[in-house]
Each structure stands twice: as C-alpha cells, then as structure tokens.
Image: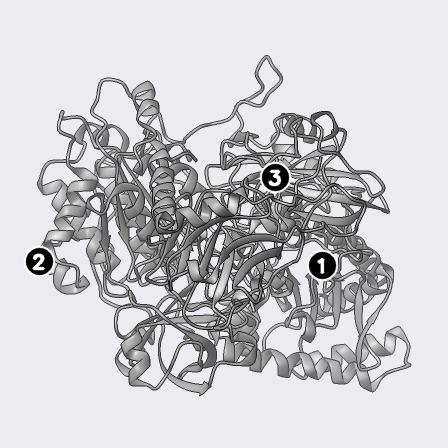
Amino acid sequence: MAYKRQTDRLPIIPADATEHNAVCHYCIVGCGYKAYTWPINRQGGTAPGQNKFGVDLSQQQVQETEAWYAPSMYNIVQKDGRDVHLVIKPDANCVVNSGLGSVRGARMAENHPSTTTGTQQHRLTDPLVWRYGSYQPTSWDDAFDLVAQVTARVIADNGEDDLIVSMFDHGGSAGGYENTWGTGKLYFDSMKIKNVRIHNRPAYNSEVHGTRDMGVGELNNAYEDADLADTLVAWGCNPLECQTNYYLNHWIPNLQGLTTSRKEELMPGEAHPNARVIFIDPRRTVSVNAAEQAAGAENVLHLAPNSGTDLALANAIFTYIVDQGWHDEAFIEASTLREAEDRPPLFPARGLADGQPGHLSSFEDAIDANRMSLEEAAEITGVPVEDIRKAAEWIGQPKDDGSRRRTMIGYEKGIIWGNDNYRTNGAIVNIALATHNIGQLGGGCVRMGGHQEGYFRPNESHVGRPAAYVDQLIINGQGGVHHIWACNHYRTTLNATEFKRAYNRRTNMVKEAMDAVAGGSREDLVNAIILAIRQGGLFAVNMDIIQNEMGSQAHVVLPAAQQGEMNLTSMNGERRMRLAEKYMDPPGNARPDCLIAAGIAQNMERVLTEMGLETYASQFRGYDWETEEDAFADGYGAAHPDVTYAALRNMGTNGFQEPPQGVGDDGRIIGTDRLYTDGVFSTDDGRARFMAGPWRGQVTPGKAIEMDRYPFFINNGRANLNWQNWFLDQENDFVTDRWPYPFIEMNPGDMEARGITAGDLVEVFNNNGATQALAYPTETAVPGQTFMVFGSPNGTQGNIVGDGVNELVIPVYKQTWADIRKISDTPMVARGMSFKSKEYSV
Amino acid sequence: MKCNRLVDAGRRQFLRGSVTAAAAGAAATVLTPQQAKAQALARVDYPANRLANIADLAVNEPLDISYPDPNSPGVLLKLGQAVEGGVGPDGDIVAFSVLCPHKGWFMSYNGEDRTMNCPGHYSRFDVEAGGQQVWGHATNNLPQFTLRVDDEGEIYAEGVDELIYGRLSNVLES
C-alpha cells in the first residue's frame, strides 16, 4: 500500500510567525529554506492579512507558489521548552534553489523529533552507559567522567596513538564549522591524534589530493557557471539524484535554452549555441534522461566506459584536444609550470614518495606521458571512437565564431571511489587546464560534492600522508579507545563484513568486563575496562543523534543535536557560507557536538590533573564555551573576524561565497564568486601543475581478480530519496514505504536467467562477504551490470566491498563484483511497491 | 525553474488524453460541486461528487475530472485489472489529482506503463500502486480520490488521502 498521511489540511502560518534562515543540512547544494515557528495555540487564517504570505488562501494557489507547504514540511516541536508549530519550506529568494525543494530537504520538518506527532522518536535524548547488561541513561557528568577516565588511562599508559578517532569533516548536519572546530581542537590541538578517519573513508585524507596537488582547489566555480557553460560534463556523477536542485535550477535551464539572455549579458560578443551535456558513467542514470528531455537527445552524449577506465578516456580526450591545437597556449605559458620536473625513477608506477604517488609537471611532460589515441582508448574503455572524439569536440573545439568553448566539468564519486583516483582526478583537471576552463565564466573543474563543507581545524599534518588505514588497525587489534563522531561504519565502510566481525568481538570483550564488575566502584570499572583493553578489547564512545549499529557496540553513547536544533555554519559546493539558525530545541538533553567535545576536554583536564599529569592536562584548557557561537568565534571567527553570526544572519540564505574579502559599506561580507580568475593557483609559485599520469590498468589490489571471478558488476551509490546512511530516513514512513530494503537494479534478462522476478529478495555475495537487496528490473541496465543503493539498514552494500585502497588510502567502493542468488519471494513489506522505470516518459 | 515548452507539452498531453471523454468531463463539472462550508470539525467534510458513469470509461483511457471542486484537476482511470484503491465490479477504477505534489505542475498520463509524469522536474507516480512516487521530488505520494460506485454505475468521489498541491485545506475554506 502506498503510504498516505491522510492529512487533509495544515495549520496556516500566521502573519507574525517567527522567520528563521534555514539551509538544507543534507547534500552539498545547501538549498535555502525558511523555518517558521509560532505558538501552538495560534494559527493564521485564509484572509491575506491573516497569513505569512499575504494572499487569499481560500483559493487554489498556482504552480510553483510560495504559499503552500507539504505535510512533510510541517511538525510540532519544542522551542524554548514550549510546543510550537514548525514549517520549513524552500526559500524562493535563495539563488541556489530559487524555491525548489528536494525530496530530502522538503522533509526536514518531519525529520525532527516530536513527542507530539511521533516523528523521529529514535533520537537520543540522554547519555547512555553500558551498565547492568544494557544501555542505561545517565547524567552528562557521569558519562563524561567514564569517557575521560578510560581515555586518559589508555593515553597515559600507551600514548595518543592508542586513541582511535572516527569523525566527520564536513558541513551540514553532523558537521559544520562549529563542530569540526570543537572536535578538531580536541584531537589535533589538545592532542595530536594520528589514527583518525573520516565518516566515509578509512583514513584522514582528501578525496581529491590530485587536483589539490596541481594547485586547483576542487570547489573553484560558481553554480551560475552551470547556467553559462556551452558544454557541461558530468563525470562519474548523477546530479539529478545527488545534487538535485543544483541540477534542476542551473544545469537544466541552460540545457533548455532559458539562460541565453544571461549569457548575452555577462559574455557579450560571442556565440551562444545550444548547450550540450556529456555524461560519463557506466550506468544510464535519471540525470541522462532528464537532460534528453531538456536539451533534446542530440545535445546529450552518454559515454559508458568499462569500470575503472576513466583515466584512459580522459587521457585520450586530452590528447585529441591538444593534437587539434584547441588548448590555450597563452594561459599555459602564463599560469602553469613551464619546466618539466624530472620523472621519478619508477615512473609511472611510483611517485617520489608513498605520499606523492603521481608526477606533477609541465603541460608538455603531461601530454608526452599521457598520450593515448582514440583507438587505444576505445579498446580499453569500450566507448566507440566516434563518441570519444565527439566528447573531445564538445569539450574543446572552439565555437563557430572562433571563440573559446566554455566547458564546465563536474565529477564526483565515480571518479573518487574509482580506479587510480589520484591520476584520474588529475587527468580530468588536465583537460580543464589545457582548455583554460578554470577561473572562467561558464567554466570550472569541480567536485559535485556529497555533504556541504564546513572544515575548520588546527593543522593536521601530523596525521601524515599516506594516512593510517584506520580500519585495518582496528581489525588487527590495535588501539584501545575509539571515539566516534557521527559515523556508522557498519553501513558505510569498505570490507564491512570483516570490520564488523572484529569490532563486535573487541567491543564485546569490554562489555563483558564491565558486566563482570557490576556494582563495583568507578575505579573497579575503569580497571576492568583497562584490563579488557590490554587483552585486545576496544572501549568505544559514540557521539551521534541516534543509536545506530556502532552505538550498539559502544560503551558510552552521547546524544548530539543536529542543525536547526543549534546554530550551524557551513558552505555549499560553490563555497556559499550561510548561518542556519536554531529554530527548535534539541531532543531531551542532547547537545551540539562542539559542546560535547568541550565537555570531554574539560573532563580530560580534570582527570589528567588528578593523575598528576598537570602539564599534559593544561593542553586541554580553552574550552570554556557556553554556546556553539563561542566555538565558532574561537575557530573560524578567529581567522575571519568579519564573519560573525550577526553578519551572517543579516545575509540570509544567500550568505556569501568564501573566501571572505572584507566588508562592504553596506555591512555585508564581500565574497568570491569563483577562484583563480587571476590565473594564480594554489601552489607555492602560483602556477598550476599538469598530471603526468599514463593509463596503468586496474591498480587497486584485489579488483582485477574479483572482476574476472564474478559475473556481476555491483555498481553502487546513492539514490534520490535516501540521504547518506539513512540515519533519519530509516524512521521516515514515506521513505521506508518506497524502499523497505535496498534496491539492486538488474537487467531483466539477467533476472530471468537466475529465476528472479521483480521484488524478489536476493543475496549478493563474493569472497568479501554477502548482503541482500530487492531486485529492481531496469531495462537500461547493461547485462552483467547492476546498481545497488548503499547505506540501507536492511542490506549493507559495503559488506561485499574488498579492502583494497589506493596509495593514499582512498577506498574503491565503486569497483565491486559479485554473484547473485534469490533468497525469497518479495517480502510482505515490499508487496505493492512499484517496480516501474524511474525515467520520466510521456 | 520555468519551462513553458514543457508545461505546454504537459498540458496538451493532459488534455489530449481526455478528449474522448470531454462530454462526460463537462457533465461532471456542471453538477453542483457540494463544496463544504467551513466547519469546526477535526477533518474537512468532503463532498460526494459524481465524476462519471462506468459506461463512460474505457480501459486505459484517462478521463478529465476535478475534485473536490473545479480548481482541483484530476484523472479518472479504468485500468483493466484490480489495483490498490480500485472500485467498480473489476476493482480497477481509480482517480488521482493531476497536480504534481512537488511544485504543482500539470502531469501527463503515460498509458504505456500507467504512470503520471511531471514535465517540471521529471517525477513520476504509479497509478497501479496507489499513486506511489516511482521516482521524484515530491514528499508525498500522489493524492488519490476515494471513490464509490452505486447500483447505476455512477462513480462518486468522496475523499482525498493526501494534501492536494496548492491548498492548505483539501476543501477550500473561507
């Protein structure tokens, strides 16, 4: 049965409701929203003077109206301890989304906890401690004391390397400048923790070291560049589902020809032909279908390379463009390295050092090293020669009037979680540099992004490069204490089968030790835990908003607030920084992460002092923050004094684009539309580097064998409806009605051959492990290729991902091969589910 | 986002799908829409409006209707096999709002795979699965109209199971 809320009317926002700036806290796009709150015993009316919109709500409102909100945009929550109505609706005046709401962001209100409406009742409200054989609520003081006692003892005995940390590094919910600073100050300033990893990968590293080492920061353009480009390239990304309103509000209008007047205004005196778009993805996604609807199929090119062959494809496009003379010699001369660096002795297999795996050099060195003919590339990638040539033409060939073609390249996890990440990332940037499409209107070579960003931490260089492969440390029995901030490796790490087995065993050892001293003193308890750690146990402290599978193995669980329940600053994929204001209380006694970090630091100082380690204890001072604004001022605000909560609040949902350039006469922060407009790049000498990185085949350990051994390519990633590891979606009835299990898209012929029908529960298995999903017949799926959504609570895709990583410890989730067998007919919960094509069709 | 070309295409498709039933559709709209007056009830009071007679319906031929008033366009469908929420002797007659619950665009009916498709942002809904959003941006499934068929084969709409786009009360209130 399709889920229906049976909502036949909603309370009307009164004219005097309180308005708050809000930003969607899910994906990187950071759509602007407005949150409205008003007392529970009041409501607006249909007369124009009685509602926030000033319109007659007794009439049907028109398409795209501002004067409507869906039931998912409404809730009853607590604010300052009192019940209030809450509406969170897209902001028509935000330049990012112009009033569009995504299927994720438009559920923000419904995805807050409410004891009144019953939403999100799994949110943590109080600290929990493993006690009496289960989780017992307790006070912050009690929980902090146990965390500090055990952590301080382990560090004092064995050093800081025995404290392993998993923590977010991003913006939006479970992140933001306040919280990355709070945690960063604790682990990188008070301590120098080096065994640390990020929420989505098993080390503390960049996903895109390649472009950064070339001097090209990965978020270098403005979203408006997608309105202005002649050619858009989506490389290893699926923007309609993963950056929805960036795509709908900026790419699609350009493809429809609706931005021509803006092009003429900003870029007069040159041709503005119909925009074209190139998708490079083994899978035909809904993004491709939407582009065909918008631009006509003749302006859409979909290249479907064999898994992991993007480097060959990029090098062939680079070669072809240069051989045609379409590169910008003046720019290359002025803004890039002109003297080739000596190639490393083991080039191209190895770089100068383990942490420097590639060869960054001159344009000439790169074209010499990377040279790849269209025919060779076609052989490797499986993409026809004519399609590769057409892609090169669409990217690099000057326009009919001789002017330079403006091409914007967006790339994401298909590249990042793919084969030979470092060189492939660089090979794509090579194309953008050669054609001078960085720092230009309608240009950019950018990550499309996952979360928003919001990174401000003390220097982390002590972590090293390559950074420690933290999951392997845990699996191999190293570390004694594990602090976890908003991560659930059980659903999202690679080699998850093995990780979970080791993690369960090690944390259970500590649980059993704690159980054995029930009723003992705090000293007895700490001693028992330390003894268990010495025997291979792991003491886990989990900071999160819900009790997830990691938390269910932890010994202390600390409840965090999320955005909207605290003030939070972040920036989106065009570096647009906003303050998302607090509009409600966190549930129960939950706190912002930055203040939890402060509490841990203060207790560490106390305990270390009690242990007689005064000098070390003094490193944990400087956390006397009362609010998240204090943490912001201590971190980001200290580096950028102009950027205050007051200034940001005044700038609403449009904010400013980082980096800040001062304050204008109107008191508004002056931002930076796009980077590198002056041709000076982020290297010591200001000159960008090219990547000399020839095609080397499938280089991730274990992948080539897996590819040969199993019949199905298990491509994987996100779906429109589900954010990240479904941490809130798993309790959202609208979502679980559509996807009660993860889906796996399969070619109908492949299904028939295995006796699988639509909705059957199948097991997906290989030598790494096994998982389950519902078979979703998909006509456009290439035989032998599947796509499984990741992050589901009811089937972890990471169970079957091998442990192979690249030189810099970037996981290669995308390259997975496995076999598939039927487990069951369609489970009851999934009966009535639609299994029709996801592609718009009339 | 504005796209006149697409919305026009959507409207044309919508209207084209209903050409054969134009007379019945018009007949439905001249009946007095028993619009409920504002009342202090916990839920809105839905009118029972005659939409058509079973004899007017052909399998997979969408009929242009509106409910609960002329400003809420909908579609009446006989699908040929029993489906969720279906009425009539074959359990196959259903009706839905045709305003996309995402941004209120007019949707088109795709008779081939029996979905409603939104030209604005490419969402689609399965009329054989209670209006479940197959893929898209709406945060609720497609509002389905509750139907009743009397002994004469007259089809009445008597309720709606989700909030209709563009109104904060399914029955407009003064």
Q: Position of residue A474 (x, y in %)?
A: 57, 74
How crowded pointer 3 is (Cα within 10 Å; few <14, some 14-19, many 20+) is rated as many
Looking at the rendered structure, whether the residues under marks 3 and 1 are on a common chain is answered as yes
The residue sitting at the front extreme is: B152
Tag shown at residue A375: 2
Say which of marks 3 and 2 sits in front.
3
Q: Which residue is mark 3?
A: A68
Q: Nearer the viewer, residue B153 or A339?
A: B153
Q: Which residue is mark 1?
A: A119
- Give me the residue at 55% from left, 65% from top: A2
Q: Nearer the viewer, residue A546 or A43?
A: A43
Q: Nearer the viewer, residue A838 or A721?
A: A838
Give the CA distance from mark 3 to mark 1.
Answer: 21 Å
Callout 3 touching callout 2 (CB < 8 Å):
no
**Helix, strand or loop at mark 1:** loop
User: What's under tag 1, amino acid-wise?
Assistant: Thr
Say which of marks 3 and 1 sits in front.
3
**On the rendered structure, is A511 left or right of A721?**
right
Q: Position of residue A462 (x, y in %)?
A: 54, 54
- Give me the residue at 13% from left, 29% from top: A400
Q: Let me know if residue A448 appears in the view.
A: no
How crowded pointer 2 is (Cα within 10 Å; few <14, some 14-19, many 20+) is rated as some
Q: Position of residue A229 (x, y in %)?
A: 30, 34
**Helix, strand or loop at mark 3:** loop
